[in-house]
Amino acid sequence: MINYFFKTYGCQANVADSQGLARFLDELGCKEVQTEADADLAIVNTCAVRDKAEQKLFSYLGELAEHKKSRQYMKIGVIGCVASYKKKEIYQRFDLVNFVYGAREEYDSLKAYLMDSVVNLETTKQMYMTNPDANVKSGGQDRDVKKVVQFKKLLSTPRFVSLGLNRLRQDGVYPESSPRDGQEKAEKKVIDKPGAQKPQELNRSYVNIMTGCNKACAYCIVPFTRGGEVSYPMAQILDRVAHDIANGAKEITLIGQNVNSYIDPETGYKFPELMRRVAAIDGQFWVRWISPHPQDMTRELFEVIAQYRDKLPGYVHFPVQSGSDRILTLMKRNYTAAQYLEQIGWIHELLPDATISTDIIVGFPGETEEDYLATRELMEKVKYDLVYSFIYSPRKYTGAANMEDTSSYQDKQKWLEALQDRQKEICFERNLRNIGKTFTCLVEKRVAHDKLLARTEGNVRVHFQGPDEMIGTFVKVRIEETGPVNMIGVLV
Ligand code: SAH
Ligand code: SF4
Ligand code: F3S
């Protein structure tokens, strides 16, 4: 049996892609393992959004090299957003990498290739097991995955057909997902002792509803790594969601680089209609959606959420990036701070208790102290529940790559720190106001021997004491004390 290991960096689109491929490998009879040391096949799913994310890949490949030294039959693959635009470099710098496959390429060929690899690996692994000193090798670099697999021939093999894999994604993309475990590394460490059983976790389903991006924000590499927008048929998405709910999923995350720009290629229905139909599926579950763009945040969407609050939580991630109109224009974001605030007003009006989070970039080329302060002012107006904030990272191929920078990295760091410190205070104040209130929470996992982690519908973290049986269920918790990040409560 072939053991595979996934290392997944980046956003939830990558998580969904890894899960889709993991499910495919499971269907081929392979087994997922929790450490590289146990893997015959290791796949790294990569992110290119900021330089730091990209560098993680390169240092991780160094780590993998150590594993491959002792087991040379091991196969290593790099997929995802860095693979989309640095294929040549990865092949050149890392002999040990057997295949590189970008996020905008069709997954059908990759699947056919994996199927082929698994068959080959079964042989090489057996040879290795019989004589570990013989240095059985994995067979070099497959620089053209599509050629290797003779894809068409494979498609018609009985094994492929019997697995139902000829029902491939339309346009090379079928919304993949399966209710497997999500993961948060820091917390995982607490329970993932060597030899310990895999912790029980909330059954989550990540469903790609669209991929790619037709916008051209000046800082962003995603349109290059993922290509243009493609939405998947609504009927398939609804099938997938219903299937995962029937299999115990309690949290469904609809995923797309511009999730709310979704448009059904078959009927033309848009995102609010999809949400309406997902919410109409029987069962008790929450639907999350990531990542939206302000341009498609309509009143209708918030009306639908208001109408189906049992399934559609009052939580809106609403990336603003900057509070300065001058910078928003340079970023090519297609809205002003005032327009954005008007939309925030719709949330307050239609979903009065909803929580709101955002993404902010500091230090975009040409950003001055005044621009930065405009962002801080906007933060004070909205009082976000959560802010994901980043220092601008220049990315090749993007519009801003060659724009002139006027502030120093030290300044940017100072801005970021001050912004994050203030946000911590805002979160703490919000949490303090929650003391004494009771929230319906969905329980995710055990994070310490006496502590379960749950989240409110507004995505705020709650710790409380309870038995393992509560993992994956909805419970009511009254908040008794709080820190800036976690609230602490008791079951009611
Ligand atoms: N489609 C989403 C965002 C996807 S990328 C949207 O339009 O908002 C996730 C976040 O990474 C972005 O919101 C942005 O805040 C950040 N980001 C993207 N490119 C970046 C860069 N070059 N430097 C720093 N942060 C970046
Ligand atoms: Fe990137 Fe902008 Fe597209 Fe979001 S909308 S993925 S930030 S280009
Ligand atoms: Fe990263 Fe690609 Fe997602 S660049 S953020 S993994 S779309």
Image (cartoon, rainbow, N blue to C red):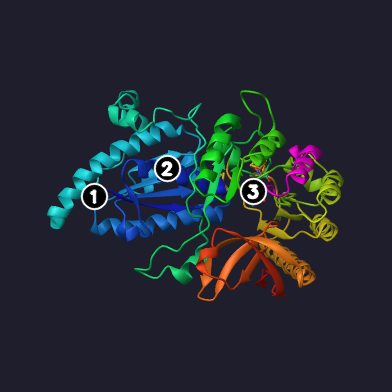
**Which residue is at a point 69% across and 28% down the rendered structure image?**
269
Q: Is residue 48 above or below residue 391?
A: above
Real-space Cα distance between discs 3 and 1? 41 Å
**Could you tell whether 87 is left or right of 158 in the image?**
right
**Which residue is at a point 72% across and 58% down the rendered structure image?**
407
Q: Is mark 3 within 8 Å of ligand 1?
A: no
Residue type, mark 2 in image: Leu
**Could you tell whether 409 is left or right of 344 in the image?**
left
Closest to the camera, between mark 2 and mark 3, is: 3
Q: Which residue is mark 3?
A: 288
Residue 244 magenta-drawn? no
**Quadrant that contains the C terminus:** bottom right
Image location (x, y in percent) of residue 267 = 65, 23
Q: Which residue is mark 2?
A: 21
Tell me the crowding category of disc 3: few under 14, some 14 to 19, or many 20 or more residues within 10 angstroms, Cα based. many
For the residue labelled by badge 1, is the local secondary structure a helix, a strand or a loop?
loop
The numbered mark, 3 or 1, whose residue comes first in the sequence reads: 1
Q: Which residue is mark 1?
A: 73
